């Protein structure tokens, strides 16, 4: 089978001053973001929102096709 990348989604979980979780979801990001890229992106979000980064989750969608 051939695998073709379709899309990657990123979800960041942040915490506000009242210990409430805030979720940020981004669709169609780069194919394979590195841990460093995700950490740097989360650091920018922390500065812009005054929230604290807790965790990140990636999901990738691939298309699989049968090779004849």
Image (spheres, rainbow, N blue to C red):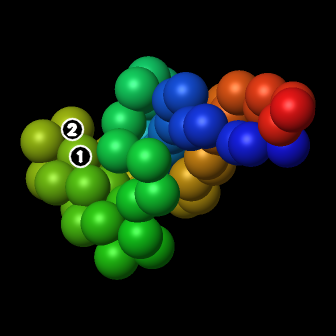
* Residue located farthest toward the bottom when viewing the structure as drawn: 36
Given contact means CB atoms under 8 Å apart, are the residues at marks 2 and 1 in contact? yes
Residue occupied by mark 1: 45
Real-space CA distance between mark 2 and mark 1, rounded to the nearest whole angstrom: 6 Å
Q: Nearer the viewer, residue 29 or 47?
A: 29
* Residue located farthest toward the front when viewing the structure as drawn: 68
**Image quadrant where residue 20 sits:** top right
Of marks 2 and 1, the one in the foreground: 1
Mark 2 packing: few (<14 Cα in 10 Å), some, or many (20+)? Answer: few
Q: Nearer the viewer, residue 41 or 9?
A: 9
Identify whether 45 is placed above or below 36. Answer: above
Q: Secondary structure at mark 1?
A: helix
Q: Secondary structure at mark 2?
A: helix
Which disc is residue 7 wearing?
Answer: none
Quarter of the image with the C terminus is: top right
**In the image, what residue occupies the spot 63% across and 48% down?**
57
Q: Position of residue 49 (x, y in %)?
A: 21, 38
Residue 50 visible, this angle = no
Q: Position of residue 43 (x, y in %)?
A: 24, 62
């Amino acid at each position: 089978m051939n695998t073709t990348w379709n899309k990657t989604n990123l979800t960041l979980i942040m915490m506000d001053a009242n210990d409430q979780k805030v979720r940020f979801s981004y669709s169609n990001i780069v194919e394979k973001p590195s841990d460093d890229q995700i950490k740097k992106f989360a650091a920018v979000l922390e500065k812009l929102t005054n929230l604290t980064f807790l965790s990140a989750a990636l999901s990738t969608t691939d298309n699989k096709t049968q090779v004849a």
